[in-house]
Image (spheres, rainbow, N blue to C red):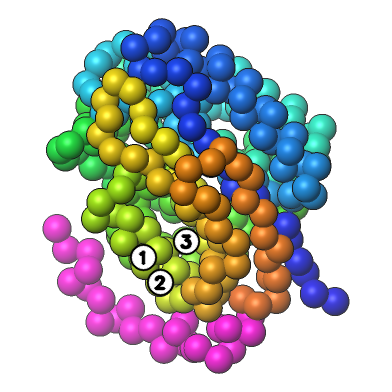
Amino acid sequence: MARVVRGGLIQTTVTHGGTESPDKIKKAMIEKHMGLIEEAAAKGVQVLCLQELFYGPYFCAEQEARWYDITEQIPDGPTTQLMCETAKRLGMVIVVPIYEVDLPGIYYNTAAVIDADGTYLGKYRKNHIPHCAPGFWEKFYFRPGNMGYPVFETAVGKVGVYICYDRHFPEGARALALNGAEIVFNPSATVAGLSEYLWKLEQPAHAVANAYFVGAINRVGMEEPWKIGEFYGQSYFCDPRGQFIAEGSRDKDEVIVADLDMDQITEVRNVWQFFRDRRPDSYEALVRP
């Protein structure tokens, strides 16, 4: 009998401009997402991923210490605890991107992974941190991740996370596969321009090279006051053959849903024997500084 998992992705606009208080925006965005999570549950979603830094605007468009105020501890912070309660109530695995404080002044771009019974399973900290114009000043806010590429055993299967800029690095995508990932989620905040072409190229390529499902999430809309570009949505799922099986719009708040046939992973790997034919003995140069 086929093992089919219904996956979901949430893409949405921010509720307020970035000149509003960070706390006000955070509260409004959490409230907005709770409605969308309920919508996902009504559609039968079993595993759901939210967008990068879901409870705020993409504040990395500026370098302002006031955004440190919306950091939370994981798993003890209120948002993780709320999502644990929600996951248990809905019987849904949820991947929750949060701006994490580890120690005073030590902050990470992180995603908490919560099982369908409400159990906090662990977290992934974004490993690759950009710092470039225009408006992606992430090194001001985040330390590089220090937890490797964990994969989480959930009620629906083995879930891995890669966050936004990570997607440009195939090494971590392969590490997730070697750690057993069946579904890899990439919550992102990316704007029109060069990245829009890459958006539909790189992650299907990761899916093919590693024979797993990818769920790619991008927010939508133009965020005030920075206007660094249009967040163009088009969140999607692709299968282990790199084929798109569900895709969101460019400019609407929505829940993207797809049925993922997990047996397809084995089918594809039995045809394309990339894991059998790997030559790690010849890859030393890949890990040299």
Of residues 289 and 264, the one drawn nearer to the viewer in this rendering: 264
Disc 3 target residue: 176
Residue found at x 65% / y 78%: 264
Is residue 124 visible to the viewer in this orientation of the structure? no
- From this view, report whether residue 179 is shown above or below residue 19: below
Of residues 151 and 68, the one drawn nearer to the viewer in this rendering: 68
Disc 1 target residue: 202
Q: Residues within 10 Å of mark 3 (few under 14, many from 20)?
A: many
Numbered badge on residue 205 = 2
The three-letter code of the residue at mark 1 reads Glu
Viewer-nearest of discs 2 and 3: 2
Q: CA distance from mark 3 to mark 1?
A: 15 Å
Give the SS element for disc 2.
Answer: helix
- Please say whether residue 59 is one of the residues in the magenta stretch: no
- Which stretch appears magenta? 266-289
The three-letter code of the residue at mark 2 reads Ala
Of residues 13 and 115, the one drawn nearer to the viewer in this rendering: 13
Is residue 195 visible to the viewer in this orientation of the structure? yes
In-image side of 131 versus 255 (left or right): left
Q: State the quadrant of the C terminus.
A: bottom left
Q: Residues within 10 Å of mark 2 (few under 14, many from 20)?
A: some
Residue found at x 71% / y 63%: 259
Q: Position of residue 106 (x, y in %)?
A: 33, 23
